[in-house]
Amino acid sequence: MAERDGPDLRHTISNTYSMSSSTAITFGSREDRKALENGLTFSPKFDDHGLIVAIAQDAETNEVLMVAYMNEESLRQTLEIGEAVYFSRSRQQLWHKGATSGHTQIVEKILTDCDQDALVLKVRQQGPGCCHAGYRSCFYRNIQEPGRPVTLGREIADPSYDPEKVYH
């Protein structure tokens, strides 16, 4: 396993906080811009819909696995349990990644950008993939040719599992 900076998030959370509810996790104020950009208090900026973009990236290979959104509650739950919990915009509900498929994402580290309005989750993907279409990564295609229409090619040739068997 590759060496990583800092402890396993799940280990840190379970040994440090032992919370009964994710409401025990609070975020900092966004009033002081200098503190947001240079301080050490996590003060995420959620958009007008209460969401923040979250990019899941393989903790060892740095492969981008997927892009999703989190609301305050899903972010708190992610911090509490050490596994990725997102907010499904289409279903308008929390979505514990892998709850149906078993393909959970164990969160090792969460990075935020300079103004704290985007997240990168460094994860250990459990199971053969995270994409509901059966691929290891949701980024299994690439743009080939600009045209009418623009065409796509396969970045990843074959699915890593059969989604029909996983999501019956």
Image: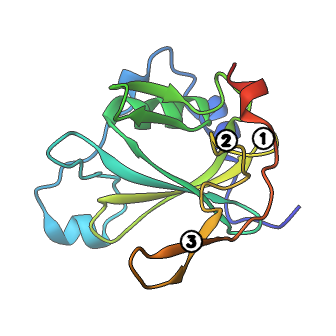
Q: Secondary structure at mark 3?
A: strand
Where does label 1 land, which residue?
A: 126
Q: Nearer the viewer, residue 164 or 59?
A: 164
Where does label 2 land, which residue?
A: 105
160, above or below 37, in the image: above
**Which label lies toward us, 2 or 3?**
3
49, above or below 23, in the image: below
Where does label 3 land, which residue?
A: 152
Q: Are marks 2 and 1 in contact (CB under 8 Å)?
A: yes
Considering only order in the chain, which callout, 1 or 2, is on the residue closer to the N terminus? 2
Q: Residue 158: horizontal and vertical position, in percent?
A: 80, 57
- Mark 1 surroundings: few (<14), some (14-19) or many (≥20) residues within 10 A: some
Residue drawn at point x = 40 percent, y = 33 percent? 88
Q: Are marks 2 and 3 in contact (CB under 8 Å)?
A: no
Question: Looking at numbered disc 3 in the image, what kind of residue is underneath it?
Answer: Leu
Residue at the extreme right: 1
Residue at the extreme left: 31
Report how far apart the C-alphas of labels 1 and 3 lie in the structure.
28 Å
